[in-house]
Amino acid sequence: MDRPSLYDDDIVTWAEEQAAALRALAARSELSNAVDWENVIEEIETLGRSEIRGVENLLLQLLVHVLKYLSAPAAQSTRSWRAEVVAFQSAARRNYTRAMRQRIDWQTLWRDARANADVQLKVHGDTLVGGLPETLPFVPDELLAPDFDMDVALERLAAALKSPTDHH
């Protein structure tokens, strides 16, 4: 049984499997009722969900900083934004598991990144660049690649900007 490896490699899948196994045990009437099955199962499921939320938050911050950099390249904070993108990306990559790909709502993540970047830029008198695509212009593998390059991401975003005459 390779459970310690699954726990270390993909805690989301591990948590789902453990919750399912506990549900099966909880359904067996011959087992003791001393275990609070419902809450134990919920805690294990919460563990998996919190891992996903952690990666989502890191990816959100990565996208927010890339958008701020694209929108305000002359801002005083660009060096720190660039450093933070590297930190957020490497942390997301370390914590990401294959099981998360289908569980992350990538379009909501992109929409939230645009909204957050807009608000943060306005605080400093800047505005979010117009014409950003409605859908995430990156595939998850690009955002989580070991060779992620912020400059390539900026170029991709700049190329994806819709001109005022586009009506997509």
Image (spheres, grey):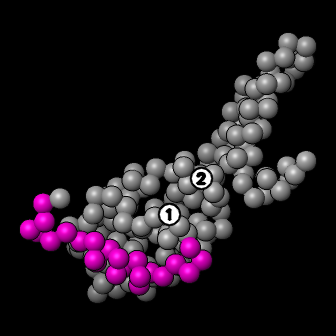
Q: What is the crowding at mark 1: few (fewer than 14 residues within 10 Å), some, or many (at least 20)? A: few
Q: Is residue 53 visible?
A: no
* Element at label 2: helix
Residue named by callout 1: 140
Whether label 1 touches label 2, CB < 8 Å: no
Q: Residue 16 placed where, x, y %?
A: 70, 40
Residue 162, above or below 24: below
Q: Residue 167 placed where, x, y %?
A: 12, 60
Relative depth, front residue between 157 and 36: 157
Q: Verify whether residue 130 appears in magenta.
A: no
The label number, if any, that marks residue 128 in the structure image: none
Residue 56, above or below 82: above
Q: Which residue is at the far left?
A: 165
Task: State left or right for residue 119 relative to residue 146.
Answer: left
Q: Residue at x 77, y 38 (%)?
A: 18
- Indicate which disc, 1 or 2, sits on the residue closer to the N terminus: 2
Q: What is the crowding at mark 2: few (fewer than 14 residues within 10 Å), some, or many (at least 20)? A: many
Amino acid carrying label 1: it is Pro
Q: Residue at x 39, y 51 (%)?
A: 108
Amino acid carrying label 2: it is Met
Task: State left or right for residue 9 relative to residue 166.
Answer: right
Residue named by callout 2: 100
Quadrant for residue 71, please give it.
bottom left
Relative depth, front residue between 143 and 77: 143
* Element at label 1: helix
Q: Residue 6 placed where, x, y %?
A: 79, 53
Part of the protein shown in magenta: 145-167
